[in-house]
Amino acid sequence: MFLLVQELSTLHDRHLNRPTLDDSVDEEQTIEITTKEITQLFHQCQGSIQRIGRQSRGASKQEQRLLRNVMSSLAVSLQDLSTNFRKGQSSYLKRLKNREERERQYFDTGLPATSSALMNEDVVEDDELYDRGFTSDQMRLAEENTAVIEHREKEIQSIVQSISELNEIFRDLATMIVEQGSILDRIDYNVEQAAVKVEEGLEQLRKGEKHQKASRKMLCIIFLAIVVIIMLLALVITKAN
């Protein structure tokens, strides 16, 4: 997808750097097709990330943590790519509108003062144009101007729709990242609490071990004391006899 975005940016520059009157319909169609393809890929990637989330429900806690980390990483990467694509589309739309305005000014200066208004009136017939003093070249120029403007309007509408879809995807990804971040925060908290409990358990084990060692030492002392007492008694009895 990254390569497609770069390719589309190159197409934008090539198309906008053409002379105003040297338009390429094939090039514009390629731009439109590539834009739709990239937008569809964004939708597909978003759906794939959501499927990962659904599949993680039956997994173990460790697997869920791993999958959520993967989801968060993918969502951030896709969001960054979506941001770059939106900026490119917005820039192209702005430059396209500027070019359209220049074309309007060019055609307006090439026709009589009343021609700009006449071009926007669908009810004007060819013979009426002749009656108003238009030459055949001026009529052809007016028709070409109208066709170019209509084509530009369709192209602009297509770009606006693409940006709107990208905004929706961007919002969904942002929500997804926030949700995954909250889940990861809760997991990290639980892991920290578990680590604290494990440490407390180890401390109790150490205390128990020390107590057990002390108890064994005490038993040994008592046993030795009993042995000494028995030996003393035996010695006393022996001397008495």
Image (cartoon, rainbow, N blue to C red):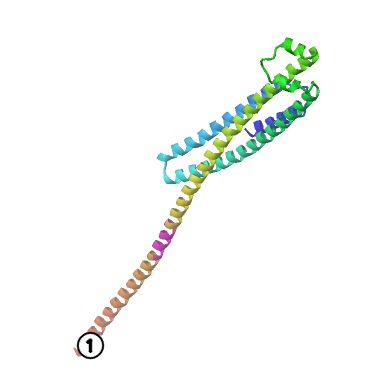
Q: Which residue is mark 1?
A: 236
**Prevailing secondary structure class for the magenta stretch in the rendered image:** helix
Farthest residue, direction front = 131
Q: Nearer the viewer, residue 149 or 108?
A: 108
Under circle 1, the secondary element is: helix
Classify 77 as above or below 8.
below
Which residue extends farthest left?
241
On the image, the x and y values in percent for residue 186 come to 45, 51
Q: Which residues are magenta?
A: 194-203
Q: Is residue 235 magenta?
A: no
- Label 1: few (<14), some (14–19) or many (≥20) C-alpha neighbours in 10 Å: few
Q: Specify the farthest residue to the bottom.
A: 240
Residue 70 placed where, x, y %?
A: 52, 42
User: Looking at this view, is 98 or 117 the one in front?
Assistant: 117
Residue 201 is a magenta residue: yes
Residue 190 x/y as whole percent: 43, 54
Q: Is residue 241 above or below residue 165?
A: below
In the rendered structure, the answer to whether residue 168 lies left or right of residue 95 reads: left
Q: Quadrant of residue 218?
A: bottom left
